[in-house]
Image: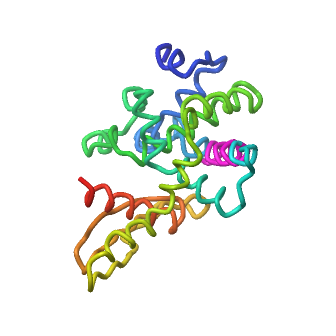
Amino acid sequence: MQKLEEKIGYRFRDRELLVTALTHSSYANERHGDCQSYERLEFLGDSILGYVTAEFLFRHEPPLPEGRMTRLRAELVCEQSLHQTALRLDLGAYMRLGRGEEHTGGRQRPSILADMVESVIAALYLDSGGLEEPRRFIMTQILQGVEIGAAHRSADYKTELQELVQRKADQHIAYELIGESGPDHNKLFSFRVTINGESAGEGSGRTKKEAEQMAACEALRKLKA
């Protein structure tokens, strides 16, 4: 854990908070309640991340309108963004998984890694007793180098996909919900986008709109490859 603390840039007074932040429910269940999973921390971290990101966008100069801030926040804190942060920190090497989850590739699963970034944010908040450390982590690990103009231009993937596909006649795009998971307060939705009935991309998000955007993003990546 010391190496991870060095990557995060913070030494925990209560290292058990960091351990819990990296403990999947499958591991906790196998130990019949002897330890806690990251889920409660992830719930708190999600709110902290949303607040810090909203504050970051609110302070942007020139000021951004509410609709644009909403779309940008969804873009900046989406699963794909947090997954990339987890990969940079190599969180997968430190997480505790149950045997079944381990065997099915949980250590590399983007949704789990993204959730653990949020749980680490909450652990930082609780251990440090305030927003200073989680804000520093979010700014340096997630928001550093973000160019608002570029992010906004790419935020509306659905419109970009629609414009690209409709360059040809008789093209039809549709989005379908293919799954949802998690508790009611923190659902994760998965959507598939099809072009003329053929699957073009899939994506996940905390809202249905975000999941549709991520599916469109994946479709664009494939079409432009």
Task: Depth check: give the residue in front, 191 or 36.
Answer: 191
Q: Tell whether position 53 is magenta.
A: yes
Q: Tell whether position 18 is magenta.
A: no
Q: Residue at x 74, y 28 (%)?
A: 132
Highlighted magenta segment, given as a residue range: 43-55
**Image-based side of 83 in relation to 144, left or right:** left
Q: Position of residue 217 (x, y in %)?
A: 39, 58
Q: Position of residue 159 (x, y in %)?
A: 45, 69
Height in image: 129 above or below 105? above
Height in image: 14 above or below 123? above
Task: Depth check: give the residue in front, 111 or 160.
Answer: 160
Number of numbered labels in the structure image: 0
**Image-based side of 210 in relation to 17, left or right:** left
Q: Residue at x 60, y 28 (%)?
A: 17
Q: Residue at x 71, y 54 (%)?
A: 64
Height in image: 212 above or below 19? below
Splitting the image into 4 quarters, where does residue 103 fall? top left
Splitting the image into 4 quarters, where does residue 44 fall? top right
**Image-based side of 16 in relation to 203, left or right:** right
Q: Residue at x 38, y 63 (%)?
A: 215
Coloring scheme of the render?
A: rainbow
Task: Depth check: give the residue in front, 102 or 154.
Answer: 154
**Image-based side of 36 in relation to 13, left or right:** left
Q: Position of residue 56 (x, y in %)?
A: 69, 42
